[in-house]
Image (spheres, rainbow, N blue to C red):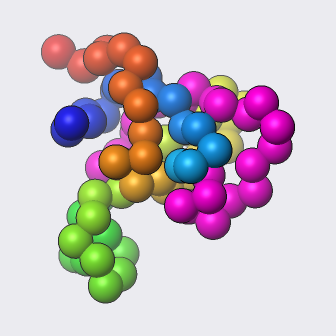
Amino acid sequence: MSLAVGDLVAADEIAFISASLDFKDNQCDPGVVIAIVDARSELNLDTDDILCEVMLNDGSIHFFYEEDLHLLTRLSP
């Protein structure tokens, strides 16, 4: 699955754990992908994974691994 900017996604417990973020019970937050970055070239991380910058419904912005997000709706054309 390849996500795009503007896609509506769900970040579940696994996504939060992989991103080293605290997960609160029943916090399967939907969010909008606002940027997609290559972890190695953009963030100088030693991985070839793709990260998505996601704005969650509470207004917070976090990076999640693309593979840990679930596509809800494709908003981009």
Relative to 11, residue 39 above or below? below
Tell me the residue at 68%/59% (across/down): 21
| The quarter of the displayed image where residue 43 is located | bottom left
Question: Which quarter of the picture shows residue 40?
Answer: bottom left
Residue at 37%, 26% (x, y): give it: 71
User: Which quadrant is the C terminus positioned in?
Assistant: top left
* 56 relative position to 33: left or right: right
Is 22 included in the stretch rendered in magenta?
Answer: yes
Residue 18 % position (x, y): 54, 61
| Residue 11 rendering spot, x and y as whole percentages | 55, 37
Determine whether 43 is above or below 77 in the image: below
Q: Is residue 3 visible?
A: yes
Q: Residue furthest right?
A: 25
Question: What residue appears at the point 57 percent right and 26 percent down from the top-left corner?
Answer: 30
| Horizontal and vertical percent position of residue 53 | 44, 49
How many numbered discs, if any?
A: 0
What residue span does the magenta drawing correspond to?
Answer: 16-36
Is 56 displayed left or right of 34 in the figure? right
* Residue 42 in view here: no
Residue plotted at (22% across, 71% down): 48
Looking at the rendered image, the quarter that the N terminus falls into is top left
- For residue 21, above or below residue 48: above
Toward which corner of the image does residue 55 lie, by quadrant? top right
Position of 54 with respect to 38 (left or right) is right
Indicate whether 65 appears above or below 9. below
